[in-house]
Amino acid sequence: MIEELVRHKWHANAAYLAEANQHAAARQDEELRTLLHHILVANRFWLFLTVGKEFDREMEAQVPESLDALIEKYRDTEAIEMEWLARCDEAELARELTTPRLPGKAFTAAQALMQIVLHSHGHRAQAALRLRSLGGTPPRSDFILWTMDSPAPEWPGTLHSPEA
């Protein structure tokens, strides 16, 4: 189930980025880009903690100047997460993680993955509202509909000109 939730998360995130990418107003909207960036940063924080990769908070906090750059970071992060997940077993999911950001607490890798999935889900609801306000149509991203075919993410192209 965890693998399905993670795969669905990437599919849904890609669908939201694709929707934003095809509308000039959404593509240029700093508020939407900042929200989509926040989803990614939270994902990267927990993922990097899980895989033992350094998380440079100052660097990660910088919102990319364009949606294209943000899409590329999403793609790169998906590759890291899916590579780790492909070799993940029950012992790895049960492994304890600690972070100075939450002192005195320990979490399992499975709990970190659930945090990533649920956190992104909640913020995609906010992204749906923002997309609507900009004239876009939020994509259908229900988990149960995704399970019918379980499609891989369809990342949008990143070659829009600034005036498009």
Image: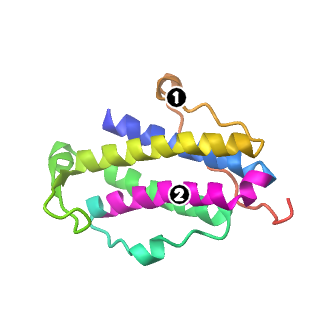
Indicate whether 7 appears above or below 37: above
Q: Quadrant of the C terminus?
A: bottom right
Where residue 135 sits: x, y (%)? 78, 42
Residue at x 75% of width, y 62% of height: 159
Q: Residue at x 18, y 64 (%)?
A: 103
Alpha carbons under labels 1 and 2: distance apart = 20 Å
Q: Is residue 99 left or right of residue 157?
A: left
Report if residue 34 lies within the magenta region.
Answer: yes
Tell me if 4 is positioned left or right of 28 in this view.
left
Percent position of residue 75, x then y: 53, 57
Q: Residue at x 71, y 52 (%)?
A: 21
Is 102 in the magenta?
Answer: no
Q: What secondary structure is marked by label 2?
A: helix
- Please tell me whether residue 68 is drawn above or below residue 145 in the rendered image: below
Residue 86 vs residue 133, the one in the foreground? 133
Three-letter amino acid code at the position of disc 1:
Asp
Residue count near mark 2 (Cα–Cα under 10 Å), binned few <14, some 14–19, many ≥20: many
- Image quadrant in which the N terminus is located: top left
Mark 1 neighbour density, 10 Å: few (under 14) some (14–19) many (20 or more): few
